[in-house]
Amino acid sequence: MHQISKIRISKALGFGSLAVLLAVLGACDDESTNDTTSSTSTGTGGSTTSTSGTGGSTSGTGGSTSGCGGGATCTPPAPAHPGVSATVGVVQGTIESTEGGPAGNIPAEVCGTNLCKITTVDAQGVFNENYNQEDNLLDVRLLYGKGKHWVLMGTDMAALPDADFGTINAVPMPAFAAGVPFADGDITQNGVTLTLETCTDVKFPIDVTEPSEQVFRAVMFSPTDGNFPGISASFNFEVMVALAPMPTAICPAAKLTIPNDASWAANAEVEFLLYGTRTFQHWTEYGTWAVLSEGSVSADGNTVSTNDGEGIPDLGLLGVRLK
Amino acid sequence: MSMPSIANLRLVVGTESAVAVAVLALALATGCGSSDEGGGGQASSSSSSGAGGECGFTGSSACSWPSGVNFGIDEGKTLGPGFEWEGYAEGCPTPSTISIADFYDCDGSRGINAIYLSSSRFNCSGCAQESSEMQAKIDGSWGALGIKVIFAIIQSDDDGPPTIDDVLTYKSQYGLDDATLIADPSMSFLIGATITTPHITIVNPRNMEVTAVQTGYPGPYAAAENLAQQNASN
């Protein structure tokens, strides 16, 4: 069994002791973001575990905490966003679950890198908002799902200012109760395994504050399981993997191993791409796909893993394709 | 119509040691011009935290609320005195009732030169970016300029009405020690039928007039700074 070798406790920033604050900050270069920082913690949620050791996506020296030694530092490349400005008029469509039936009341919003507009989805999965072209949005996308009960997905809004998506699909996430606590070593949920080094920092999103929600969950699906306008066939994805909580920063990056559902040949080389939903401290441009890690199929052909020394530094929706 | 005088009554609690200090009662205000510092009959409350820092608001305006003006939340209008929320005053580890009147500084005696009010929520990328950099701005020039920052949290982390715990989560995670954060389920400052965030309202503390309204990150930082500099020089 795996165990959490080192758990650091942090109090809420600002009111806790300086020592604790420094301890939290020390392990990973993850200044405040839209994440709930922190280590399995008191107060307002979030947790961090840390590993001694090495490895991971980037190296560096961090603070020393509770015997974790120097933590890794993970500095996202923060590529510039395209910065395309647009206004939005009428946005409409229907969202259905890939398991059948409407994705009733699914969280949705029209969101750019500068601002977000809430999109109300009714119990039948229908949305129809008129934003009256009242604001300029940068790199606007329709985001839906949020990552708690549904996979957080996004899509371009090519037909602006008005966009009629027709019927699109959302993918349910496994129940929180089926989630697996983050811990050193392998954590497996729904057939998907993350391998966390000792003293890995796990930084949850700010809206994931309940310990019962701060668990690893995963779901795999095919791009052909529904109408996902954000997953263009041109990307050549054959397997999609959603990792929650999304987005969650993992430092150092975790090895990801998934079943070879695409039946790729043994030892075939693949790429793992992340859909960008962060607007700062990000690995991928907002609303685009970019390679997070390369990987390969195992020698026996049963699994697909990220390469050693690479891995997944940010949980979210991944597309996997042959290299 | 004569608007009510500002009569603040505030209990401010210190940090971890929970030192509750001064609750001063007050007299009715009488017109602009007299500073309430050290007297004047205005509500004045502050407490020193156990750590030596001040918590909450000091003093209150010596003036009656502006009258004979158009009240509203749009640019050019004057905020009414009735806005009140639960929240965390700047520097305070415990929640309290916060009024917009806490930021009224008709004569500059309280050192408030501009009010930067951002209606924000979880799951909003622009809000996150603004929030993540605001404490540094306060620590930098904004504190010295007398720009008071308020984050009005309009939704919970599950997109419902915000609770005081949500406010604390937001405050803590962005390290907003020196901003005031309030739970604003009524979305007091949002204009229009759709919810767009962040939504920033700049208010002149001399007369509580809305001088600028903007949606989106980055906010109208220059507008706040210019207002503060202008008020500081007058």
Image (cartoon, coloured by chain):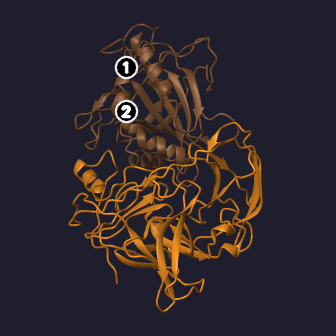
Q: What residue is drawn where x is 50% and y is 36%? A: B85
| Chain on which label 1 sits | B
Secondary structure found at label 2: helix
Q: Which chain is orange?
A: A
State whether residue A128 appears in this view. no
Near-viewer residue (A163 or B98):
A163
> What amino acid is labelled 1 in the image?
Gly
Whether residues under marks 1 and 2 lie with C-beta atoms below 8 angstroms apart, the answer is: no
Identify the hue of chain B.
Answer: brown
**What residue is pinned by disc 1?**
B111
Near-viewer residue (B85 or B215):
B215
Asked if residue A209 is positioned above or below residue B103 in the image, the reply reads below
> What amino acid is labelled 2 in the image?
Ile
Asked if residue A250 is positioned above or below residue B198 in the image, the reply reads below
**What residue is pinned by disc 2?**
B138
Secondary structure found at label 1: loop
Q: Position of residue A175 (x, y in %)?
A: 56, 72
Can you tell which of label 1 and label 2 is closer to the viewer? Answer: 2
